Amino acid sequence: MQDNNPTLACTPKLVLEGETDLSLTNAVTFQGTSTSLLTSIAPRYGSRLGGESVTFTGTQFSATTGDYTILIDGIACAVTAATTTSVTCTTGRRNTFNTPSSLSIKIANKGDVSTDGLLYTYVFKWSEGADTWGGELAPMDGETIYIQRGLNLLVDIDHSPILKAVVVEGSLIFTPESDANHERTFDAHYIFIRNQARMEVGTAAHPYTSKLAITMHSKIDDPYLPIYGNKCIGLRFSTLDMHGVAKTPTWTFMDATVEKGAT
């Protein structure tokens, strides 16, 4: 069992190299209930153009907006509302793409909020046209996409062109729509995820709850990627997350023959 509000009392000890241990006289008490803790972020992604509202939910927050200093990837997020369990801010514009993702929430007289590893991710949205594609048109059939390190590409269009290759060294992200019957398609000949990159189609904590069809195209005589082949999603020292809605049961035993179409 895990105690989410631990209390630890101790007497600090000072140890100097080559010296005798020195015990300090005042005891220090650490209380989990006094620590501000972040439990969720909504939404988890937002445009690198900024101007989007994001809400951080947790415990031991402050209801005073002026108490907060929030930095996302080192960029200030202007606080607009706060309660003892949540704080909402408006994101700033992220002009660079190669800055590692980070989150810092500080509350006056409380210190740093424990973020528990949660992050808000700035993304380049496919649908944002020239702002995402360097002033050019979005990719067309037969073209190749290179997602460089530090760049997070969010696929928010319903149908992609049939791409030649997608080389990922940053992040390729698919997020579901609120409509469970919404259908999205993504087509390519090769997807290669390498060098600590990431492709996400839902996670265990945040599964993909609408419909997505990823189709890999190739003929038997098309060029092969060494080791991986053709018509493939290749993964090298990276992460591929694919989590859909849990199905129950996932399998069953049959104790008699069932004809096609039987119920």
Image (cartoon, rainbow, N blue to C red):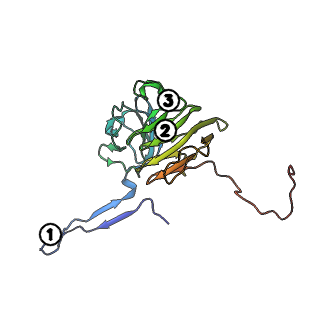
Q: Is residue 35 above or below residue 130?
A: below
Decide which of 198, 26 is in the foreground and name it.
198
Q: CA distance from mark 3 to mark 1?
A: 62 Å
Q: CA distance from mark 3 to mark 2?
A: 27 Å
Q: Residue at x 75, y 61 (%)?
A: 252
For label 2, the SS is loop
**Residue at image mark 3:** 139
Does any portion of residue 205 appear in the rendered image?
Answer: no
**Residue 16 bears which disc, if any?**
1
At label 2, the amino acid type is Pro
Q: Position of residue 32 (x, y in %)?
A: 38, 57
Q: Position of residue 103 (x, y in %)?
A: 36, 44
Q: Classify mark 1: residues with Cα within 10 Å, few (<14), some (14-19) or many (20+).
A: few
Decide which of 197, 110 is in the foreground and name it.
197
Q: In terms of sequence position, does the residue under pointer 3 or pointer 1 come before the other?
A: 1
Q: Residue at x 56, y 41 (%)?
A: 189
**Residue at image mark 2:** 43
Q: Residue at x 40, y 32 (%)?
A: 48
Q: Is residue 177 left or right of residue 56?
A: right
At label 1, the amino acid type is Leu
Does any portion of residue 129 appear in the rendered image?
Answer: yes
